[in-house]
Amino acid sequence: MKSRILVGIIALGLAAPAFAQTTTLQELTTKGMIMDAGGMKFDVAYKPDGSLAVTMDGADVGLTGTWRIDGDKLCTTSNFNPVEECAVYPAGKKSGDSFEVTGSQGTAMVTIK
């Protein structure tokens, strides 16, 4: 169950619009996010080299992956789901903003750090 939730988190947390929505995308990939999915909160850190890491309550959960921008999307892969998934995030969001994101594994609440 935990693996399925983690896969969903990666799918949701690693996709966002770029060109017209650079503010949201820049905030997300520069500052990271907290994702609340399935009653669990995960901290996703995006690194400048295109890698990402996920922790829960400050502890490593063994979830790592990659991210990249493709047009208006942020696409990700992970060690739990090597199939690249992309999701769209709302435009104009900044640090501290919370919003829902829906991906292939469902909907999660995202807060940009």
Image (cartoon, rainbow, N blue to C red):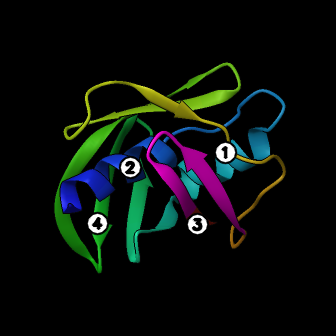
**What crowding class fits label 3: few (fewer than 14 Cα within 10 Å), some (14-19), or many (20 or more)?**
some
**What crowding class fits label 1: few (fewer than 14 Cα within 10 Å), some (14-19), or many (20 or more)?**
some
Residue 111, given in percent of the width and then of the height, sits at 61, 68
Q: Residue at x 29, y 80 (%)?
A: 57
Q: As drawn, is 7 to the left or to the right of 101?
A: left
Going by the numbered disc 1, the residue's amino acid type is: Gln
Residue beneath disc 2: 8
Residue 99, given in percent of the width and then of the height, sits at 70, 64
User: Of 77 and 49, which appears nearest the observer?
Assistant: 77
Give the mark nearer the N terminus: 4 vs 1. 1
Give the mark nearer the N terminus: 1 vs 2. 2
Mark number, residue 26: 1
The range drawn in magenta is 98-108
With respect to residue 28, does 97 lie above or below?
A: below
Q: Nearer the viewer, mark 1 or mark 3?
A: 3
Going by the numbered disc 3, the residue's amino acid type is: Met
Mark number, residue 51: none
Give the mark nearer the N terminus: 3 vs 2. 2
Going by the numbered disc 2, the residue's amino acid type is: Gly
Q: Secondary structure at mark 3?
A: strand
Q: Nearer the viewer, mark 4 or mark 1?
A: 4
Mark number, residue 55: 4
